[in-house]
Image: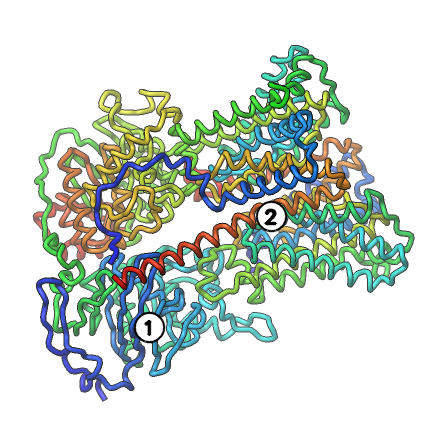
Amino acid sequence: MGRHDRIVGGGDTVLDMQTFKEITTSDHDLVDGAQRRLRATGLRKRFGVVEVLHSVDLDLMAGEVHALLGENGAGKSTLINMLSGRILPDSGQVELDQQVVNFNNPLAAKRAGVSIIAQELELVPTLSILENIFLGAEPTKFGIIRWGEAREKVAAVLNELGIDAEPSRLTRTLSIADQQLVEIAKAIIGDFRVLIMDEPTSALNLEETSRLFKIISRFKAAGVAILYVSHRLWEVFDIADRVTVLRDGEVVQRSLIKDTNTARVIQSMLGPKSSLISGATGRPKRSSVRSAVPVFEVRELNSGRILTNVSISVDAGEVVGLAGVLGSGRTELCEAIYGLRKVDPGTKILIKGRAVELDQPKKSSRHGIFFLTEDRKQEGIFPQLDLRENVVLPNVLDRSDRAKTNSVARSNLVKVTGFGVVSAQDELSRFEEMRRSLNIKCSASRNNVTQLSGGNQQKVLFARGRIAKPFVMILSEPTRGVDVGAKEEIYAAIDQLAGDGTAIIVSSSEIPELLRLCTRIWILRHGKVVSEVNSAETDEEAILETMAG
Amino acid sequence: MQNIKNVQPLNLERDHRWEFVFDSHRSGVWILNALIILFLAIETPNFFNSGNLQSVLNDASILGIGAAAMTLLIMAGAFDLSVSATMGLAPILGLLCGGSYGPIIILASMFAGAILGLVNGLIITRGHVAPFVATLGTLFVYSSLGAIATGGSALLVTSPFLLGLSTGAVFEIVPYSFVILMVAFGMCCFIVNRLHIGRWIRAAGSNIRAAHVSGIDLQWIYLALFTLTGALTGLAGIILSGYLASAVATQAPNYNLSAISAVVVGGTSLRGGEGSLVGTLLAAWLFAMVNNGLILYGVDSYWQYLAIGVVLVAALTLGVIVELSRKWISEMWSTQKIRANQHS
Amino acid sequence: MFRSVLKSESLASLIALVVVAIVFTAINGRFLSRLNIEGIIVSASISAIVSLGMTFVIAMRALDLSVGSIMGFVAVIAATMLSHDVSLSIVIAISLLAAAGLGLANALLITWLRLPSFVATLASFSVILGLSLIITHGATVTIHNRTLSELVIGRIYGLVPSAALIAAVVFGVMAMLFFRTPFGRHVAATGGEARAAIGAGVNIPRITTGVFVISGALAGLGGIMTAGMLQNADSTIGSGAELMSIAVVVVGGTSLMGGRGNLPGTVLAGFLLSSIKSGLNVANVPSLYEGLVFGGILITALMVDGMRRTERRKGMLVV
C-alpha cells in the first residue's frame, strides 16, 4: 500500500506572472482521507489591525515530509504556533485523523500527538537532560519521580542522535548543537502522529544533520506526518516530499517537490521582489589587492585548548571568511579576537601594524572593531529600547576622531565617560539613512525591536555597526535565521561596506555564503588553521572536504 | 489590507519623553494621587495648611532625593539595599568630620555617602558579586558601622544653617529640601534623557550581555551610579538629620524598601531598561501624603503599616486595570475598523 | 544530583563551620559548652527552617519579603492562644494554617494581580506587620504554659534536641519535594527558564501558589518555634528575618537567578551563621558589631564564589 498509489501529481500547475502565485488544481480531493493525518482549514489570525494569516489551508499526509517555506513575516511561525497549541486561531479548524481538535495550550497538542521541535530552544539550563525531556510528564509512583525505565529510553534516543552525554548532565554544560539535539530528543520521545520541525538543523553540522535525516526516514516509514520548516532550501529539496509556500499570510504555492525547483520556490516566496535574487551563485565583487601592512592582523593566537597558533590577516576593503564545523574554533576565534574570550600571552593582535591589547569588548570597540553576534536575542538586541536607540548607540564606536589617533580613549574624555549630549534630531536622520539603505521594514522608529522579523533584527544590528564606521567588522553567522530576501540585502550591504574600506571577517557555517562574500577563506579544524584558500580558486566541495579532514 | 512592511518615509516624531504621562501602566500613581487628594480635601481639609503641606513636602523630598538616584540604578538593572544604612552613617560621618559649619557638613555627608556608594560599586564590579546580595551585605556592615561610630546613641545637630535648611521654606510652603529635590531630580533627568551615559544605562538594564558585547563600559556605569546613589542618599540623610536635629544610625530604617517601592509604584520596571523619574517623584509624594493623611485622620499608628501595604497594592493594581482596559478598548477599536474596512 | 550539589558549594560552608568552631572556642571555651551548643542548635534550626522555604522561592527566581512579618504574626497569635490555655496541638494547627493562608495571599497578589513578587511581598510585609501591631498594641505576650517550650527546646528521649529533629524532618520533606517530585522540578524549571516550563505545560500559577504557601507555612513554623524558645512574643519577632534568610540561602550556594536550589547548603549556612552569632556573643563582642561581621562574611563568601567562576568574561558583571 505505497502512498505513491494515492498521491497523484499535484494537478496542473500554472504560474501567474502578475501575482507570482502558483495556481494548482486542488490535490486535496485526490487523496484518500484515511491517509491524511492533519487537515487545517481556513485558519485566520489577526494581531491588532493586521491580519497575519488569511484563511490558510494545510494538509499533512502520513509518512510524508511536508516543507513549509516563506520569508520571515509570511506567517509560518503563526501557523506553527497554532498547530502546536501556543496560540489560538481567530477562525478555522484543525482536524487530526479526521477528528476536530481544539488545542488551547501546548500540553493539549502534545497529548493529542502533535510534537514540535521549536526553533528557539526551550530547555531549562539548570536541569538535566533527563529532567528536560520529561518536563511536565515525569514518570512517578505515588507522587515520587522514578526515572528507571525512562533513563534507558532516553539513553537510547541520545545514542541514536549521536549525543555523547549522560542523561543526568545539566543541559547548560552542553554545546549549542547538543542542546538542539536534546530539543529534538524531547520531541521524538513518546508517541506522536504529527511532528513539526522548525529550523531543526540550524546549529547542526553535516554529520548530525544526516543522522537526523535518517531518523526522519524512520518516522516516515512509521506513518508520521512531518511538517518541516527551514530556510535551507538545499535541505528541503533533499528531504521533503511536498512543499507549501506562504507569502504575506497566504498560500501561494502548493506542489510536490519533484514538480518544482529552487528558483520557482524562491519566486513564490518573494513575489514581485524576486528579481533581486542572484541565488548563492554570485561572487565577491572585489578582487583583493594586498597591501604591505594589513589593517588587521592576528599572530599566534592561542587560547587554552580551544585555539592553537592561529594567524589571520585582513586588508582594508577586503572580506575574508572563516570556515569550519561547529567545534572547529571558528566562533571561538571571533570571540577571542574581540575580547570575549581569554587569549594566552604571546598572542599578538595588530591594527595597522601597531600591537594592541583587546581583552574586553570595550577596548575592541574603542579601537574601531565591531562584532555582530550570532545570538542576536541574548547578545544583540535591547528589547526595551526603541529601534532608533538600538541602531544609534551613541559614541560607543565612532570613527570620526579615530582618523587622528587610532583610539577614542586618548582623544575625547567627555565622550568616553558618556557626558556627551544626545541629539534626537541628529540620531533620527542617521537612523533614517540606515533604514533606507538596508531596507529595514518597520512602521516607525519608535517600534519595539522584538516585533521585527529575524532578518530585520539582523539588519538593525548590522546598521548599528555600519553607522559607527568601524575599521574592522567581525560578522558571526550574519544570516542565521534570516530569510532569502533579507539575506541578499545584507550581502549587498556587506559588499558596500567593503567598498568603503572596512575590513570584514565573516564566520559562517554556510559555505555558499562564504564563497559569495569572501575573497580569501581560512579553514579551521580542531582549533587550528589548516588551510587558506582563494575563493576564486576553489568550490564548496573542496572546502567541505578540508573542513572534515 | 494593511501592510506593515511598506517602506514609507517617516515623520520626525515628537520628543517621546513626554509619553510617560499617558503611558497607562504608570497612570496608577496619578489616579491614586488624585483620588487621595480629593478625599483629603473633603475629609481633612487641614491637610492643606501651609505648615502641614510644608511638612509633607519635606518628607516627600527626603524620600524623593534618594529615590531619584535609585530610579536610575533600577533602570540600569541593579539595586541598592544599603541606602537605609547610608541614610544614617553618611550624616554621622559628615557631622563628625565637618565641624560645625553647615555647608561643609552637607558636603562632607555627601562625600561620605559617595564613598559608601563607591564601595558598593567596587564590590559589584571588581568583586564580581551580584548587586542584590552585595548591597545586602553592605547594609549589614554600614548599619553596624553607624551604630559603632556613635556608640549607639545620637549625635546632636547644632549648626543653625542646617537646622534652618531643613525646616525653612520658600513662600512659607515650599521647603528648601524640595528645592534641593528639584535640583537632584533635574540632574537625574538630564543624565538619563540627554546624555550618552543615559542611553548606556538603559541599554545595560535592558540586556546587560548585549551592552557588554557592544562595547559599553559597564564597570564605569555602575561605579558612577552607585556613587551617585550614595552621594544623594547622604544628602537626603543630612537633611533628615537637620529636621530631626539629630543623627543616629537607625534614623531611616525602611528607607531602602520605601525608595524601591516609590520607584516601582512610579512605573519603573524592576527588570530595567525603562522607567519614569516623574513617576518616582509622584510616588514619593503619594507615600508622604498617605502617611500624613493617616496621622491627620487620627488613625492609630499601628494601622499605618496596614495602610501603606494597601496603598502599594492599590497603586499597582490600578495600573494593571488601566492597562487591561486600554488593551480591551484597542481590541474593540480594531475590530470595528476591520468591520468598517470590510463593508467599504 | 543530590550528592553533586552537596559536594561543590557546601564544602566551603562546612570548612567555614569547622574553622568558626575552632576560632571561637579558642577565644572562649564556653563556646563549646552544652548550654551554648543547645542554644545554637535551636536558633540554627529555626533559621534553617525558614531559609528552606526561602530556598524554594529563590529557586523559582522570586523573593518573599514577608517571611519575617509572618514569623512575628504567627508567634503572636500562638502566644495569645497559649495564654488562653488552648491545647498545644490546636495552637500549632491553627498557626500553621494561618501561616499557609498568608502565603496563599501572597500567591494571589502575584498570580491574580500580576505583581512582581518583590512588590507583592513587600506590601504584604507591611500589612502583616500592621496586623501584628494591632493585635498586640505594641505589647509583649508572655507565655506561661510550658508545653510549647518543652517541645522546642527539649530533647527527645533525652538525646536528640527536638528543634534539630524538627529541622531534620522539614529538610527531609523539602529535599524530597524539591529533587524528587514533579512539583519540585517544575519549580526549578520555572525559575530557570519560564518559557520552557510554559511550553512543557507547567501550570505556573499553581507552582507559584505552592511555593509561597510553603514559604509562608515554614515561616509560621519558625515563628511558633521562636515563641516557644523565648516564652514570649511581640511584633518584633522575625524583624529582619527575610533579609537574613536570603543571605543564608545565597551563602548556602543557591543562585538568585533561579533554576537551582542547594537545600543542604542552606541548612549548613543557617548553622554557620547562627554559630557565628553565638560566637560573637560568647566572645563578648558588643551586638553593635554583629552586622559588621555578618556583612563581611556574606560579602567575602560571595567574592570567593565569584572568583571560582571561570567562564566569566572580562568587564562583565554578575547577574
Seen at 72% across and 20% down, the residue is B245
Q: Position of residue A39 (x, y in %)?
A: 30, 77
Decide if residue C244 is on the left or right side of residue C191. right
Q: Position of residue A89 (x, y in %)?
A: 36, 68
Q: Quadrant of the N terminus of chain C?
A: bottom right
**Up-down relation of residue B205 to residue B142 (above or below):** below
Quarter residue B192 falls in: top left
Decide if residue C165 is on the left or right side of residue A169. right
The kind of residue tagged 1 is: Gly
Q: Residues within 10 Å of mark 1 (few under 14, many from 20)?
A: some
Residue B314, disc: 2
Q: Position of residue C266 (x, y in %)?
A: 64, 51
Residue A92, disc: 1
The kind of residue tagged 2 is: Ala
Decide if residue C63 is on the left or right side of residue A475. right
Count of numbered circles in the view? 2
**Up-down relation of residue C267 to residue B166 (above or below):** below
User: CB of mark 1 within 8 Å of CB of mark 2?
Assistant: no
Query: Which chain letter goes with mark 2?
Result: B
Q: Position of residue A289 (x, y in %)?
A: 9, 35
Mark 1 to mark 2 CA distance (whole Å)? 41 Å
Query: Which chain letter goes with mark 1?
Result: A
Decide if residue B262 is on the left or right side of residue A423. right
Q: Residues within 10 Å of mark 2 (few under 14, many from 20)?
A: some
**Up-down relation of residue A283 to residue B237 (above or below):** below
